[in-house]
Image (tube, grey):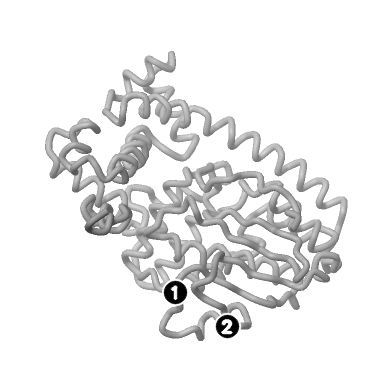
Amino acid sequence: MTELATPAIRDWDYPRGTASVLLMLQFAEEHGIAPDRVLPGTPPEVLHAPERQVDARQELAVVRALCSTIGSGDDIALDLGSRYRASTFGIFGFACLSSTTMRAAMEFALRYLDLSFTFCVPHVELAADGIRLVMDDSRVPADVSRFLVLRDLCAIHTVMRDLLPDVSLQRLEFRYSAPATVDSYADTFGLVPAFDAGQCRATLDAAMLNRSLPQANEQTVALCAAQCDALVAQRRTRSGTAQLVRERLVRLGGVDAGMDAIAGQLTMSARTLRRRLTDAGTGYRQLLDEVRQALAEEMLNTGVLSVEDVALRLGYAEASSFIHAFKRWSGTTPASYVRRSVPRVPPGR
């Protein structure tokens, strides 16, 4: 089995444009949910600036807010995924539309995957029975994994049909259990999936790879590729300061040293640091929360440290403050997280 091309990223934690967040805010409004309930503290109009970007964890927070307000059911995830069209992805989507064949479009998409909005990393495998599109959700947080597998795969399927309207799937498999009804799956994908499978994957006819795309234009693709290169380089540069702050907060064990102290370590003023983090679509407090959540989950997963121990190590004066913060980050309490995530050892072992 051969992989068509190596995905540009291996994890979902990369800076993104704002189109996906704006799409989800509109989706929430259609369901009667005000934008400030999904993205508190950020007026939607500021997201319309072309150069604006967001941190992946900001988008993840919006996903969690949607799940807690509208619902996390399969029908909701599939409905949301179907809203992602090729045009949603800007120059990246336009390049895919202009590719000569489906193979060329897939290779381009994988090469510039960090210009997409996916959380599940897609792998395209060439097998004897066809093209296998495998969705890797191994690093996606468990509380939104099923929702995001469906959203992301549905979005990919929708964009593929924008490229080639008669694209159809031969098989569809999911790792998780079957829902009460599969009508929305059949309506979306044109077939009923298999559940409780080993992977989340869709299989297409291998002949689809060499199908010519109706809007193919090699000159357009070349122009788009140059713009995508520049955009990727710009995003990586702008997100560099955020990563430096993360690294220092991790070294401090999640303890809040204060923005002034971190800025001093980076040999810049607090004002400059604040501006650079804003340019990268994040902020000091948000980065501190991200680091604390990651460290908290890591410590809780050991099954050894109590909630009080974790709170103390992260610099919280009281466990209650940590519990409140953890629920804000993840939508659940530390105790519930442990019950769901830490494997139980059977008695007598």
Q: Mark 2 — residue?
A: 192
Q: Position of residue 99 (x, y in %)?
A: 81, 58
Look at the picture and state if 122 lies above or below 32. Answer: above
Crowding at label 1, few (<14), some or many (≥20) Cα neighbours within 10 Å? few
Dot label at residue 177: 1
Q: Is residue 135 left or right of residue 66?
A: right
Name the residue: 65% across, 56% down: 123
Q: Nearer the viewer, residue 7 or 220?
A: 7
Look at the picture and state if 186 lies above or below 99. Answer: below
Quadrant including the N terminus:
bottom right
Q: Earlier in the sequence, mark 2 or mark 1?
A: 1
Name the residue: 51% across, 86% down: 183
Q: Position of residue 252 (x, y in %)?
A: 32, 24
Name the residue: 49% across, 57% down: 22
Q: Position of residue 165 (x, y in %)?
A: 74, 75
Name the residue: 69% across, 57% down: 93
- Element assignment for label 2: loop
Report the amino acid beneath label 1.
Ser
Q: Position of residue 235 (x, y in %)?
A: 59, 37
Look at the picture and state if 273 lies above or below 211. Answer: above
Dot label at residue 116: none
Quarter of the figure with residue 265: top left
- How many numbered marks have been drawn onto this rendered protein structure? 2
Report the amino acid beneath label 2.
Val
Q: Is residue 276 visible?
A: yes
Q: Is residue 44 visible?
A: no
Crowding at label 2, few (<14), some or many (≥20) Cα neighbours within 10 Å? some
- Element assignment for label 1: loop
Look at the picture and state if 330 lies above or below 294. Answer: below
Q: Nearer the viewer, residue 330 or 226?
A: 330
